[in-house]
Amino acid sequence: MHDPDVRRPAASRDRNDHLRSALWIVLVYALVAGLWIYFSDTILGSIVGDRQLMVRLSVLKGFGFIAVTGTLLYFLIARRIRRIRGITHALADSEARFRSYVENAPFAILVFDAQGRCTDSNPAARELTGSAKEPLHGGKEDLLCPVATAPGRQRNRPGEREVQRPDGRRLWVTERDVKLPAGGTLSFCLDVTERVRAEEDLDRAHARLVQAEKMEAVGRLAGGVAHDFNNILTAVYGYCDVLQRTLAAEDPAQGFVSEIQRAAERAASLTQQLLAFSRRQELLPRAVDLNDLVLRLRPMLERLIGEDVAVDLDLARELWTVRADPARVEQALVNLAANARDAMPRGGRVSIRTRNAALDGTIPGPAVSGAMEAAPGDYVAVTVADTGVGMDEETRAHLFEPFFTTKDFGKGTGLGLSTVYGTVKQSGGSIQFHSEPGKGTEFTIYLPRTQEPASTAAVSPASRPAAHGSELILYVEDDEAVRSMVTMVLEQQGYKVLAAANGVEALRVAPPVLEQIALVISDVVMPVMNGRELLERLRGMRPNLKFIFTSGYTKDIVDQHEILGVAAPLIEKPLDPASFLASVRKVLDS
């Protein structure tokens, strides 16, 4: 790297020093010569009277003067030459040292003239700009063109910005400019792309951690709500069933009871959506052909969306199968279709596409809260796209958060996309979305491929045996409202019921009639003694005793009580009387 302007002041000073030194030598020489000539001739003229001798002495005087002054000039000039050589060598060493500093600097150094053209650069600058030319030419924006950065990627550090090289590669650089005294600019640039990307990865990891903490908090809340809520809904379901059996078919109160049941069903659905978001719902996965699922779902989607919205299907041939819970996948697609409908108040088009996808560990596109994470492998992608109003940046940032909704008050719970998110992640998949205001929205669900063949048999409701009976049943439940309701329902079907509020009370009332007890129905989580401990104690007295467990807690909490592998089915609350009675009859008849 060479910049003559930088060294111009020092060179000017050296040149002036040389001129002053030469002038002093000439002046001294002239003074000495004048004095010598004047005084030597005057002195010789007064001493020597012979003219010829005077001429000879003048010649000798001239030779002596030449010898003396020549010797003096020699020593003066030699001294000056040695000094100049020392200065020249020092300058050469200094230039080489500073050149090595510049050439080996880990950051780019570029020199621009007063017109903004690059006149010099170091190797780091040529490497930064991706150019092998030496020196570089053009202005700064030609070499490192500023890029309009998305709002989410703006940097707060001064002097740091994203630029694009002439070859199209984008970099993050930090730069500082220094004005030169002779005009122009000295620019220092450092490539900080790796650090910026590492910080972005750290930000994404932090966002995923925050999202995970949110999900864990919601999951804990959902687990606690599910237990108490399901107990309450069990009582509501049961008493509605009792009222419907008690009231005459033409009684106007039948309509009120039906409305109460529908409200209870919506409440139960809300709890299930919370559990789906927090990934605490229990899935029943099997091999599924998503093309068949979408085709079966189409009539319902068309009724849900309405006549002013067209539904287009683009189903890939030879689609791979996936392992998932078909009911939950259907619910996810219905939620996406419902959102698409709400985004098109004046009508539009919904497109559902399927395809095979081989992923390398990342899915291109915008991500929210880690939703884009996907392990490498084969996936089946199903896309739901609409031509609606789209979403702005603020909406996209909170898209999968529970209870976040842009709908008017009373028109949405904010759990639709949360449910989709939880179902997809619990199924081992991932979800991608793309949306811009006025350009519609597109969601793509990726579910991992399975080698199992898809089941083509239609799932039909299980036949329910007669619910009536006369056997003695021990029912153990710590919630008084649920215990009273279930006891009443069982007794209305002819069963004899021995009710207990907890395991200790059950062990006190059961032994006298243990041989007559046909079935024990027990809650899993109870104070003092849980359902598993009660089962072990009673089967210790009677090994072949039949058991049914019930619980309003989420599956992960139930699993902590180790009821799996104890030959006792689990019925989840809220208990629907008809299904509950059918399950009781099935266990008794087994």
Image (cartoon, rainbow, N blue to C red):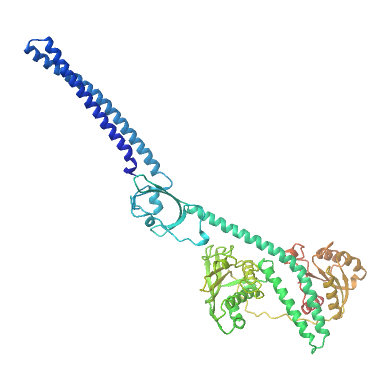
250 on left or right of 186: right
Which quadrant of the figure has residue 352? bottom right
Q: Residue 548 is drawn in which quadrant?
A: bottom right
User: From this viewpoint, which residue is outermost toward the bottom?
Assistant: 250
Outermost residue toward the right in this view: 512
Q: Is residue 296 above or below residue 361?
A: below
Query: For the point 67% across and 79% down, which residue is it?
Result: 459
Query: Would residue 569 be visible to someone looking at this image?
Result: no
How many tags in the picture?
A: 0
Image quadrant where one finds the N terminus = top left
Horizontal relation, residue 349 to residue 520: left or right: left
Is residue 114 shown above or below 282? above
Comparing 237 with 4, the one in front is 4
Task: Choose between 59 and 429: the one closer to the eye.
Answer: 59
Residue 206 locus on image (x, y percent) = 60, 57
User: Which residue does the image show at 39% across and 56% down from the upper left?
Assistant: 141
* Residue 107 left/right relative to 223: left
In the image shown, does 302 or 487 lie closer to the viewer? 302
User: Taking 163 as reference, is 330 left or right?
Assistant: right
* Image quadrant in which you'd find residue 409: bottom right
Q: Residue at x 76, y 70 (%)?
A: 229
Residue 273 placement (x, y as % from top left): 68, 71
The answer to whether residue 247 is visible is: yes
Place of residue 74 in the rendered image (x, y in percent of width and height, measured from the top left): 23, 23
Give the percent coordinates (x, y) of residue 523. Answer: 81, 68
Q: Quadrant of the C terminus?
A: bottom right
